[in-house]
Image (spheres, rainbow, N blue to C red):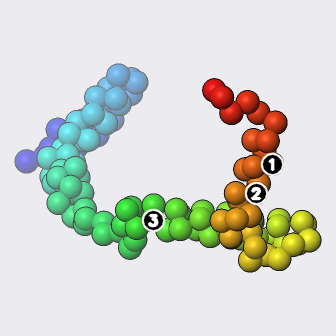
Amino acid sequence: MASEFEQVRQAEPKSRIQRRQARVIARAERAQKQPSREKDTEQKKPTKKRLIPIWLRMLIVVVLLVVSMTAGVMFGYGVIGNGKAMDALKFSTWEHLVDLVVKGTDESK
């Protein structure tokens, strides 16, 4: 009892249409013999557990942003501005800076 593919192959198809029909039949037979690949991949797919959760990643980014901005302010005030780096973190320094910027503006608005 030979399969359709073997029968067509034994007949040695000569036209392009006959060869294509033989390939289609062979693919159909292979698909019937093999289990569906889609079902296997869905069942075997393990759930991926993140090493670092997204909320923790966001928190790390915010902390790194604050640290880098603080370091930048201290570097700019201490090295470029020839002041003490720790003075950049004092409230009085920022109050003085705001007073310098707002000095020429109209406060009645």
In front here: 4 or 106?
106
Left or right of 60? Residue 64 is right
x and y, in percent, of residue 17 in the image: 35, 22
Left or right of 7? Residue 98 is right
Q: Residues within 10 Å of mark 2 (few under 14, many from 20)?
A: few
x and y, in percent, of residue 19 in the image: 35, 30
Left or right of 69? Residue 59 is left
Q: Callout 1: helix, strand or loop?
A: helix
The amino acid marked with disc number 1 is Leu
- Name the residue at 17% across, 60% down: 43
Q: Which residue is mark 1?
A: 100
Is the C-beta separation of discs 3 and 1 under 8 Å? no
Q: Is residue 68 visible?
A: no
- Name the residue at 39% across, 23% down: 15
Q: Which residue is mark 2?
A: 96
Judged by depth in the image, the label closer to the viewer, 3 or 1, is 1
The amino acid marked with disc number 3 is Leu
**From mark 3 to mark 1, how far is it between C-alphas?**
34 Å
Judged by depth in the image, the label closer to the viewer, 3 or 2, is 2
Tell me the quadrant of the picture where the C terminus can be found. Answer: top right
The amino acid marked with disc number 2 is His
Occupied quadrant, residue 69: bottom right
**From mark 3 to mark 2, how far is it between C-alphas?**
32 Å
Residue 59's tag is: 3
Q: Residues within 10 Å of mark 1 (few under 14, many from 20)?
A: few
In front here: 104 or 41?
104
Is the C-beta separation of discs 2 and 1 under 8 Å? yes
x and y, in percent, of residue 22 in the image: 28, 34
Relative to 107, does residue 2 appear above or below in the rendering? below
In front here: 93 or 62?
93
Q: Residues within 10 Å of mark 3 (few under 14, many from 20)?
A: few
x and y, in percent, of residue 25 in the image: 23, 36
